[in-house]
Image (tube, rainbow, N blue to C red):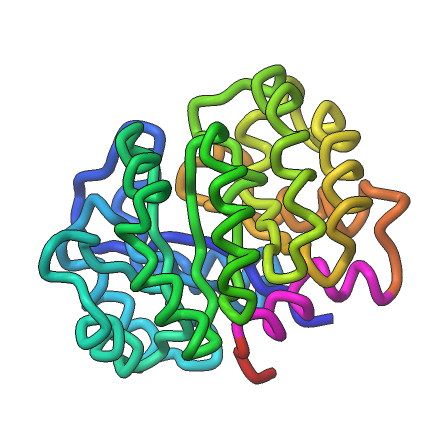
Amino acid sequence: MQIIDAQIHLWAGHWAPPHHWRAPYTIETALRDMDEAGVDRAVNCPAIWDGAANDYAVEAAVRHPDRFATLGWFPLDETADEAVLDAWLARPGMLGLRFVLMDPGIGDRLISGALDWLWDAAHRRDIPIGLMVLPEHLPLIGGIAARYPRMRLLMDHLAISPFDTLQDAAARIDALIALADRPNIAVKATAVPGFATDDYPFASTHDLLRRVFDAYGAHRMFWGTDITRLRCTWGQCVRMFTDELPWLKGHDLELVMGGGLATWIDWPR
């Protein structure tokens, strides 16, 4: 079984937001930790807090193309257009894009259609886009997915904020599950230990995971870590899924642990 982490951040600078406490997290450190945990590959989402992280992502993909691929980002400001997008996708290791849309004002841009050029470009190019959004904007994402069915969306962290509790997550999970009827929306089951109320195997989160799995299925729920903000080990994150979820076995387990993600983002194995 090939194990692929759906989301990590690589960066060489020493600053990071407080919830990403493993700073910096370099290529060499990631490879060491992946080898120790039995993780074959990882999707690097360049750190938005480090201006050099996008170039560092290219370096990682060039040096280790069988271990790292990238979902890159660029500022969604007045300079952003399809030419910028195409230049970005032409960079080595770039399989798609990922944006953090957590500003409360982003809802106005989603409603007004200010970002429709991006969704349309992704639709016509048939590429994946990872998204981190506020829970109240999930219904807007559902409408966007319906209008641009060839754009493959990946919702970060079960659509749960780094600062949410398990109680918050449980209260908001229905909005994510409501999107499961959109076949071009998938979910990253990343950073789950971060909102657990207990230690390994983080049993407090298992019912939540089962609800998402039942809605999205093995082809559209992808294991991962966002390891730099977790206090547990990468190996514990792996074993939580491979050893501690009795309902996740066989081919379904292979898909969740990497097979489904590789297909979703077109990363040949």
Image quadrant assignment for residue 266: bottom right
Q: Residue at x 62, y 74 (%)?
A: 263
Nearest the eye: 175 or 73: 175
Question: Residue 256's image quarter?
Answer: bottom right
Q: Nearer the viewer, residue 41 or 75?
A: 75
Eyeballing the image, is 61 above or below 219?
A: below
The quarter holding residue 17 reads: top left
Residue 104 rendering spot, x and y as whole percentages: 30, 28
Relative to residue 200, is residue 264 drawn left or right? left
Above or below: residue 236 compared with residue 223 = above
Which residues make up the magenta segment? 251-265
Residue furthest to the left in view is 79
> Please, is residue 153 above or below residue 266 in the view?
above
Q: Position of residue 85 (x, y in %)?
A: 25, 71
| Magenta span contains residue 105 | no
Q: Which residue corresponds to the image point at 73% horizontal and 38% vertical from the top-left?
A: 209
- Residue ID at (30%, 54%): 115
User: Quarter of the image containing the N terminus?
Assistant: bottom right
